[in-house]
Image (tube, helix red, strand yellow):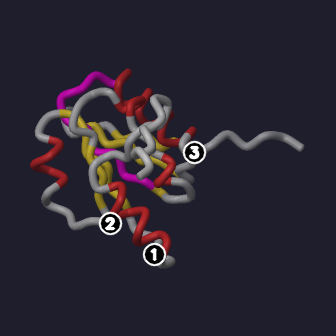
Amino acid sequence: MSAARPRSRNRLKLPPFGRELQEARRHGAHPNVFVHAGDFAWDRAKERQPPEVLCLPDDYFALYDWRCVKGLAITLVVWGREYTFIDQFARHLILAGASMVCALNGSDGRSVFYRPSVKPR
C-alpha cells in the first residue's frame, strides 16, 4: 500500500471557479471571464455562471494560480479597494498570461486597460 503523495508546498491553488474554467478550456471554449474581487466578491461572482467567472475571496491574489486566464481577455471588477490594489492585481493577471485586462473600479467608475508589453525585435 503506497502513501498518498503530499502536495508540494510551492504549488498554488486555483482561484474559485478555476477548475470549471480549465475544464471548459480543455474542450476548446474561449469564455469571456469576469474576475470579481473586493467587497462582496462572492455575492457578485454568484451572478455569473462558470466558466465565465473567477473570484478572489480575499485580497491575497498572489496566493492563487491564475495561469488559467492565459490567452483570455479578462474583465476585473473590484469594489472597495484602493487603485494600487487594482493595479497590482491587473498586472499580476497579465503576468499570468491574460491577453488583456479591463480593470473596473466599482467604487468610482474608473476603468483602466492593461496589455502585455510588446518587446522590440
Taking the spot 57% from the left edge, 38% from the top edge, the residue there is: 95
- Judged from this view, the residue extending furthest toward the front is 1
* Residue 118 is inside the magenta segment: no
**Pointer 3 local density, CA inside 10 Å: few below 14, some 14–19, many at least 20:** some
Residue 85 in the image: above or below residue 3: above
* Distance in Å between CA atoms under marks 1 and 3: 21 Å
Q: Residue 12: x percent and y percent? A: 43, 37
Q: Report how many numbered discs are placed on residues in the image.
A: 3
2 or 3: mark nearer the eye: 2
Q: Mark 2 and mark 1 in contact? Answer it, CB < 8 Å.
A: yes
Q: Which of 7 and 57 is in front in this view?
A: 7
Report, in whole angstroms, how far the alpha carbon at label 2 lies from the one at label 3: 22 Å
Secondary element at tag 1? loop
Give the mark, 2 or 1, whose residue is nearer the N terminus: 1
Numbered circle sitting on residue 115: 3
Q: Name the residue tied to disc 2.
A: 51
Question: Looking at this rendering, what residue extends furthest in the bottom direction?
Answer: 27
Depth check, front residue: 44 or 12: 12
* Label 1: few (<14), some (14–19) or many (≥20) C-alpha neighbours in 10 Å: few
Q: Which amino acid does label 2 sit on?
A: Pro
| Amino acid of disc 3 | Arg
- Read off the residue under disc 1: 29
Percent x, y of residue 111: 36, 41
Q: What stretch is highlighted in magenta?
A: 74-83
Q: Position of residue 75 (x, y in %)?
A: 37, 52
Residue type for callout 1: Ala
Above/below status of 59 relative to 90:
above
Left or right? Give the position of 2 relative to 76: right
Residue in the image at 57% along x and 48% along y: 97
- In reply to whether residue 76 is colored magenta, the answer given is yes
